[in-house]
């Protein structure tokens, strides 16, 4: 459930932040957007949603590690945990860069300069569509390997995860759909884990407790 909440929160939050205003907006559109009285408030709500979704993501990571049990290979387990923390940090920083102009308006009462707002949001796009997907591939590929070696994930999901991870890693385009691939993968893994019974060694650990 944490993974589904994370995927939904990230998708809704990122979509709202990227449209507040749009990345391709010109100076007039940016000035018009920040002239709206509720612009800063709505952006702060979306930013809070991103924070809560990231907390759910870390809980999702904990659930996966618990499902893997003691058979988790240390090498891939370390890459999995490190990639998850890195991806979470990059997503939060990118979201903060998207929201910064509106927060300035809401907290300081200062209308952002259109040029400065464009630069802040351009940096956010670089973080979210170039750097974050590479960190996400570390999570996706290591999860696929861990799921294959421990039997915690079905074979079709393992190979699908490999394909998604490789495509995300080699993709050199700066496009918005790239941002949503990771939340979609999290939602898919979460649904599979909800429907799939834990492997035997995890059941045994729980029974012993």
Image (tube, rainbow, N blue to C red):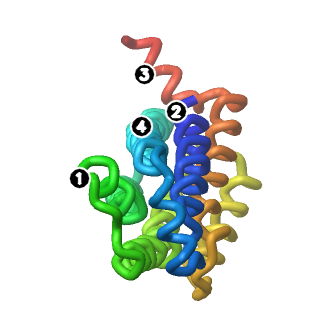
Kindly identify which residue carries mark 3.
Answer: 205
**Quick check: marks 1 and 2 in contact, CB under 8 Å?**
no
Kindly identify which residue carries mark 4.
Answer: 52
Kindly identify which residue carries mark 2.
Answer: 2
Q: CA distance from mark 1 to mark 2?
A: 35 Å
Q: Residue at x 56, y 35 (%)?
A: 5
Compared to residue 44, the image places residue 175 above or below, namely below
| Disc nearer the start of the sequence (3/2) | 2
**Quick check: marks 1 and 3 in contact, CB under 8 Å?**
no
Q: Looking at the figure, which quarter contains the C terminus?
A: top left
Answer with left or right where residue 173 lies relative to residue 90: right
Kindly identify which residue carries mark 1.
Answer: 108
| Disc nearer the start of the sequence (3/4) | 4
| Disc nearer the start of the sequence (1/2) | 2
Between tags 1 and 2, which lies in front? 1
Question: In what element is the residue under mark 3?
Answer: helix
Q: 35 or 26: which is nearer to us?
A: 35
| Coordinates of residue 91 in the picture (x, y in percent) | 41, 59
């Amino acid at each position: 459930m944490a993974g589904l909440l994370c995927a939904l929160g990230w998708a809704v939050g990122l979509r709202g932040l990227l449209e507040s205003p749009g990345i391709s907006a010109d100076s007039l559109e940016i000035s018009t957007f920040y002239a709206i009285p509720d612009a800063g408030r709505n952006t702060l709500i979306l930013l809070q949603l991103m924070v809560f979704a990231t907390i759910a993501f870390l809980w999702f990571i904990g659930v996966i590690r618990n499902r893997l049990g003691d058979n988790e290979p240390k090498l891939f387990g370390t890459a999995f945990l490190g990639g998850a923390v890195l991806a979470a940090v990059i997503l939060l920083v990118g979201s903060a860069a998207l929201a910064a102009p509106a927060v300035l308006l809401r907290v300081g009462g200062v209308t952002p300069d259109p040029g400065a707002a464009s630069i802040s949001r351009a940096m956010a796009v670089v973080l979210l569509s170039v750097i974050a997907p590479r960190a996400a591939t570390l999570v996706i590929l290591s999860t696929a390997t861990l799921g294959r070696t421990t039997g915690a994930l079905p074979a079709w999901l393992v190979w699908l995860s490999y394909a998604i991870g490789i495509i995300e890693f080699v993709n050199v385009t700066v496009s918005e759909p790239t941002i949503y691939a990771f939340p979609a993968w999290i939602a898919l893994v979460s649904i599979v884990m909800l429907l799939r019974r834990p492997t035997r060694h995890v059941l045994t650990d729980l029974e012993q407790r």
